[in-house]
Each structure stands twice: as structure tokens, then as C-alpha cells.
Image (cartoon, rainbow, N blue to C red):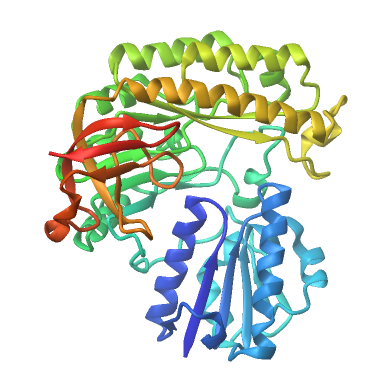
Amino acid sequence: MKIYLESLGCARNLVDSEVMMGQLLHHGWETTADPAAADAIVVNTCSFIESAADESIEAILRLAEFKQTGACRRLVVVGCLPERYRGDIADALPEVDVFLGTGAFGRVAEAVDGAIPPQTCLLPDPDRAQPVDGPRRRPSLRHAVYLKIAEGCSRHCTYCIIPKLRGTQKSRPADDILAEAHQLVAQGARELTLVAQETTRYGRDLSGDWGLDRLFTRLAEQFPDVWFRFLYGHPESLQPGVVEAVAGHHNICPYFDIPIQHSSSRMLKKMGRASSAEHLRDLFAAIRREIPDAALRSTVMVGFPGETESDFENLLSFIEQVGFDHLGVFTYSDADDLPAHHLPDHVPPGLAQERYHRLMRRQQVIARANNQKYIGTTLPVLIDGRTERGVWIGRSQYQAPEVDGIVYLNGRAAEPVRWQAGSIVTVKVIDTLDYDWVGEVT
């Protein structure tokens, strides 16, 4: 029996998909990359914002056609979409046999095997759900792997649905994380990216003195030939010890992903975040004092209810002052189940989109200027593979997988016999683009 699984959304969702696939393989299913050949199809959905929910629904309807034209006899939808919309989504999509919420990942094998009756929607409390045991399916990009260290979020940002979908933060025991890291490294991982809803809050709910700094240190010392980095930090929970751990280990990437959402103190208060522009400015300055070459990445939101032109100009000025190496920009996505929906003075979508483009143009100039400082430097690059045109590509420690720019490799690229994805080569940067670099292998 063959299974096809389509994973939508963020890196954290991808980890869930790999865990479920590992469970299905353990139960005797074989994977296929062709949904038409699959006896069962699983869709791991995202519904964080409206566009993500729309993408999930489109994928479900597209894959449901294989129940008529292919071998599929069972269509299972899991994750955030059924968790958020519950019975409404089940009524709207009769093509789906079983819906599993975020607390029911462990029952995916039952769902595809037919042990759960059709038209069932299982939505157990995510806070009471037991973690899914067993090995993950080996990722397709074996050398660069995400490692989830916690689930859920205990904050109450007014624009965010995650606590409702995933429950409060539940940090994984450090021994479990270290054991999974051993397994992934044995399978060929050369870069492990730690992820959670709030990675820098890791360990606050555990007994003892575990935190991200101690976890980083243990990982870096046990696997000295593996790169480590984190995504999805928070400015209110990033402790000085984390910066010290990064500074003290050559294999922890000098890379800080700290979404700030905004820089206007007035807007941050509306968003339910306790940071202020002064605190944020001091935080990034402190990181650069400790690690002058640190790459700073952040995420901001424009068009949040009540955002004035003055607030937006404040944000433009802030990103110039900090000079982020990488920046993600989003427009506010409204929904009636968000606290922010009830705030006054919603920003027209057209104006929000205009601000998005203005901010991205400004960041493009900043990123181009930041990249130029690397011209002439020599540094290690982790090879990811080749483009369709056969050009080898990779990333430095200053570039995270999938979200940042890449390094195009030339020079001795005509002799790639010894190269493979996961190899680390020494590269001299000879040119830069807006977001990418061009390097010559030395």
C-alpha cells in the first residue's frame, strides 16, 4: 500500500509531517511521490493566515480528485486547518474521509488504515495530547534538517491564532532532543536548525535549569562537525546566555532570527507584545557588541489595525537604524476569531500592500549594502546541491535554509566529483547580488 503526504506551511509543520511519515512507514506503508499512485493521501495543513488556509483548501480539493481518477481510497486532512475551523471545515469538505486536529497526529496510521470511521473529525485538546514516538522519515534534504524543541505558545499576541491551535508551550526534554540529534546526524545531517513557536523560551516549563543556551552548548559540544542555528526567537525571551553560547562555539551559526513585528511602541502594545523600540534597539546593539559579524534576521507586520503613517515611518526608520541582514515582511491577515479583529481603525488592504512594497524596497537596498561587506572574504559554505542548470549552490553560516539568500559557486565547480550535498567547502566571495552571493571555491 502506497501513501502520499503533502506538507504545507512552516518548518515546524514539516517536522510534524516527517514524524507522521515515520509512523506510517513503521505500519507498513510505502511512500510515493505520485499522488495518482497512492492508495491513501495525507495533507498536513496550515491556517495561520487566510492565504495559508486558502492554499490548504486548494490542495485538498486538488488531491481529492485522485479518489476518482487515481488509486486513492482514503483522504486524511491533519493539522491546523481542522483545528481552527473544526466542524465547519468538515461540513465544507465532504471529500475528506478523516480530519485530525493538531492533538491527533499520533492517530494518522489508524486514519489511513481505515480504523477510524469515515466523516470523523478528531479534535483532542492539544495540551493533553501525547507526543508521537518513533523515528522521523529521513528528510529529502538529508544534510540540513529542522529539529523541533518545543510545541505550542504561551503568549497572547492579538494577531496570532497559534496558542488556540497548538496549546501552551511544551518544551521537549533535552535528552529526547539530544537522542533525535544523534539519529539525524547518523543519517547524514550536517546542519540542524532548532525550531519551535518561540525557540528562545525553550525550557521555561521544564524542571531544572534548562534553557536554549544550555541546550545549544550540549549540542555543539557533542557534534563539533555539525552546524546549529535557531529560528523563531522572541525579543522578550532571548537571554544573554544564548548570545554567549553562540559566541563561544564555532559550529553555532552567528545568526539570530528574532521577529519583532513592529517598532512603534504604540503598535506593539496593540499587538499584545511588551517590547518597546528602545528595548529592541538595545537588544540588537548588544548582540552586535558581543558578535560583531552576527547576521540579524527579523519579521515585521504592516497594516495592523490602527497603524498610522507615522507608525509606518517609525518602522522604516528602525530597519534602517538596525540594518537587518534578512527581513521578512507580512501584511496583517484579519479573521473574526482573532482579538485584533475587534480593534478599531482597520487599515485598507490596498494601503497595507503599498506599505509592504515600500518596506521591501527599502530592505532590498539595506541587504545589498550589507552583502557587499562580504566581498573578498573567505568563509565555509555548506553545499545544498545544484540548480536545474547545473550550478552548485550552498549557504554560509549567515544564511538559513529556505528563507535567506544562497551562494552560487564557481571557480573549481567544473571539478565537482568530490562534492556532494552536505559537503563544507572554503569559498571566497567575489560578488554579491541583492540577496545572494557569488563565490569561488578555493
Q: Judge left or right: residue 38 versus residue 25.
A: right
Q: Judge left or right: residue 28 versus residue 251.
A: right
Q: Judge left or right: residue 321 versus residue 314.
A: left
Residue 23 position by quadrant: bottom left
Q: Judge left or right: residue 203 versus residue 383.
A: right
Is the C terminus in the top left, top right, bottom left or bottom right quadrant?
top left
**Residue 150 to residue 70: above or below:** above
Q: Is residue 249 visible?
A: no
**Residue 372 to residue 409: above or below:** above
Image position, residue 53 (x, y; %): 70, 56
Image position, residue 192 (x, y; %): 31, 48
Q: Is residue 76 visible?
A: yes
Image position, residue 252 (x, y; %): 25, 35
Residue drawn at x 53%, y 51% as measured from the top left: 10
**Residue 434 to residue 2: above or below:** above
Residue drawn at x 21%, y 25% as measured from the top left: 377
Residue 19 position by quadrant: bottom left
Image position, residue 326 (x, y; %): 46, 30
Residue drawn at x 44%, y 25% as measured from the top left: 368
